Amino acid sequence: MTLFRRLLRYEAVLFRKDRAAVLLTMVFLLLSLYGVANGARWAHMERTRLRAVQAAQQKATETAKNAAAALQQSGGKAASPFADPTSPGVVGGLVHGGHYALLPPMALAALSIGQSDLRPAYVPVALQPAQDLLSHVEIENPQNLLEGPFDYTFVVVYVLPLFLLGLSYSLLSVDLENGTLALLLAQGVSLWKLVAARVCIRFVVAMGCVVLCCAAGLVAGAGQGLTGQGVTGQAVGYVLLLLIAVATYILFWLVLSVLIQVLLRRSAAGAIVQLAAWVVLVLIAPALINVYATSLHPPPSRIAQIQELRRATTLASGRGAQTLQRFLNDHPDLAPRNANAGMSDYFSSTLAVRTESETLVQPMLDRFTLEREARDRTLQRFRFLSPAIVMRLAMEDVAGTGDARYALFVQQYGRFHKQWHDFFSRRILQQVKFSASDYDTIPAFSFQEESAQAMALQSLASIAGIAFPMLVLASIAGRYLSRFKPIS
Amino acid sequence: MEAEGSMKSRGGLGADLRASTRIAGNDLRDAWRDGRFFSTLLLALLLLGLSLGATVHAYKSVQEQRTAAMAETHSQFISQTPKNPHAAAHYGMFVFQPNFLTSLIDPGIQAYTGVAIFLEPHRQNDFLFRPADDAGASARFGSLSASIVLQVFVPLLIIVLTFDAVAGEQINGTLRQLLASGLSLRGFGVGKLLGSVLKLLLLALPVLLACAFALWSADVRQFAGSGPRFAWMGAAYGFYFLIWLFVTLIVSVWSQTPRTSLAVSLGIWVIATLLLPRLAVDLSRTVYRTPSNLEMEQVISKELAPDAAFEAKLRRDALAQYRVTRVEDLPVTWAGISLMAAEARSTRVYDRHMDEVHRAFTRQDKLQAALGLLDPTLAVRAVSMGFAGTNESQQRAFAQAAEHYRQTFVTMMNGDLAAHGRKDGSPYVAGHELFERVGAFSYQAPSAGQVLAQQWSSLAALLLGAGVSLFIFLRSLPKLRPTR
């Protein structure tokens, strides 16, 4: 048996005998499993909710379609023009919505609630401005949102480094303080191998917990779409990428711990500095990056936006019939077949006024989007300053609960909203009845996931983003370790 | 017996006090010399500077924008072109969230509510445009408010300054020497306590002064008016810091080495500031559930569906009230009566459901605050957000004031339509004289006394926590034994 393997065996025995380390591991595992269970519960709730939305939409469409068919047959009129199933304005949702665009949880949703409690998983599709529809949020106590979810991502990003700190803060310095390091080295044990064996044991313990939790998360929240059943090959691939990222993250903190001990040589001082590093990298750095990005690209005022939209609506409404007339001049193909009836039609006017006011505020909305995109780009660029940010974003991306996937959803929603608008506005302006058979041609939204290749590239970039500082720290630690004096 | 004996010094109480003062002085000198105190203070000021610097700058412009927007939205409403009063009500109005100076210390849930509410007939809208939605991925990861510095970082700094107060003397063997020189354990403990409190004061005073200066420079008038709120917040944070100080001292007394003391204190810090607040959220969410948006919309639209029986009863009542037999003979417009009744009905339905949701929120918040008996971070957070005016109940108070205003102007418009509308169905238009009767929206936030009535239990939990931890520290002193 080689020396290293013997060291590994002894270290494993020592770890098992260390009651504090075992207790710490148990607590960490418990917190991890709790995080996964919370995520699985959330994903299940989201799927149940989305299935209810889908069912409600199907039922409402079916009822409206039957009512339209009945009206067509009888030749009668609806009780109210605002509930007329043959009016394209009503069906398209100029007054009330009834259709939704769904963003179903991904296969690994159990591993991260991420931002999904902030972002709606179902957005109404109607003829109101897309940005108004996207601002419909789920009912949730703001105080709970402020605190953030206790999910597995939280455990990995925040708690895992502290767990590793607890396991490794005296990994080398304890022998130095007790005077046993020199004795050990005098037995012919290489310092390198000793440190490597101790790091190895802690890495294996931490990774064991992570593998267990990722497997639990995969099984608990597996499956794409609204059913969430069955483990797909793609999901397994994502889990493997995630495991590599977490392994790199664990190594980063272990190497940092070794470096600090090699430099400071005292456990208490080393622990304080490691904790300070945790505070800086996990709590302060993200905040500073955020402050910097926001000061560089401050979000335009929402108050100003509201007022600008208000002025535009007032202007467009004030023009009233002129707005509709100008709109029809620009789109002669949409002119009503009965030209005289069009002028007084409520839906046509409302639609024209909305379209006009949206056009008026579009430059401002574009400014808003540009500033936000610039801010996001800055944040993305600076995320590599803290492995904690990289880790968090990587986990949220793989689980599909981060900003990147939601941005893709918003993009697709925007395109779909335009398609929806074109589909119904043509019928509203031409004042044609919406027949029962038209119900079958209503556009349906289906979210297209990012390709697995793009996701893999993104994950590899994250892994590189954590691996690079880890390797730099490792090389510095290695240099100091080779000159390390084993006597305090 | 030995423990009791070691509690008494050879020179009596006076000598104990003198020795305690000397120990406190030594502690201060040591903290200054090893650079820990200075770097801790610098870090605290730096973090506060960063958190307040960014928000103070934004505060003034938001304040100006809000005042201008409130005036403009009212002016837009009253200067509408003559039209049907109900259509005028549909034009609606925005009301904007108040921006309190105290929110610079604790922005609380502001980022998760929204900046404005749109008021219109038939429905009660929620807040629009949550700043957290605009913040993107950094919404939760990168917030650094003064309250986070005070609730999370300052306790950490207290631990770093205090963890070796007693355990350090143990490991260095100086505790045995001190006791051998005739000093009692109580004298030693009180000296350590005094030294630690002095360090805390020297740390807290510049921090508080820096906060006060930043707030004063942001808005002198609101600063003067918010005195009582700041005072209560200051008291809560004072108790909170004392709890951390006493707990760290207790751990230091119970630990054989500074290493153990640090590890245990940090463990407590992680549990109290990082884990328990999130676990409390989970617990409260599980105990008091809230419906989904869809569920609530479905129930409301079902309850508000056209109801022939309701219409018939309304018609019967109106005919009976005006002692006529036909709608055409009513001295008021039927459309106006119908609209007012529909508005009252929808208000009742919305009120009931919104109240249910907010009752669940309040229960969740109360449960979290009650857990403040176990975790002072939860207690101080409740008090801090309460006096900052940024907790759920005060956001709700604002939303209720806005809702009351909505009902007032919608009723005024519908009432005018009922009184003056044309019975023959020809269009009726009202003008400025009606619209100008709608006054501007104003909101009076709850006073510090009213907030105190809501938050007294959390404040009491903090006071109790400080008292109990001090008591435990003093009680644990006699059990202290020199180990080296």
Image (cartoon, helix red, strand yellow):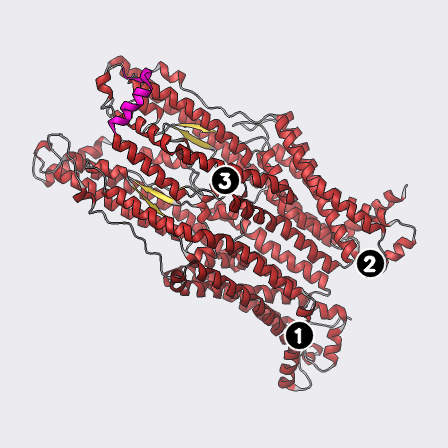
Decide which of tag 3 and tag 2 comes sooner along the chain: 3
- Tag 2 residue: A176
Badge 3 marks a residue whose secondary structure is loop
Residues drawn in magenta: A320-336
Q: Left or right: where does residue A2 sit relative to residue A171? A: right
Q: Is residue A333 magenta?
A: yes
- Tag 3 residue: A117
Crowding at mark 2 (Cα within 10 Å: few <14, some 14-19, many 20+)? many
Using the rendered view, name the quadrant where residue B93 is placed. Answer: top left
The reply to whether label 3 and label 2 mark residues of one chain is yes
Q: List x then y, in percent, for residue A95.
A: 31, 29
Q: Which amino acid, mark 2? A: Leu
- Tag 1 residue: B478
Which mark lies nearer to you, 1 or 2? 2
Using the rendered view, name the quadrant where residue A273 is placed. Answer: bottom right
Crowding at mark 1 (Cα within 10 Å: few <14, some 14-19, many 20+)? some
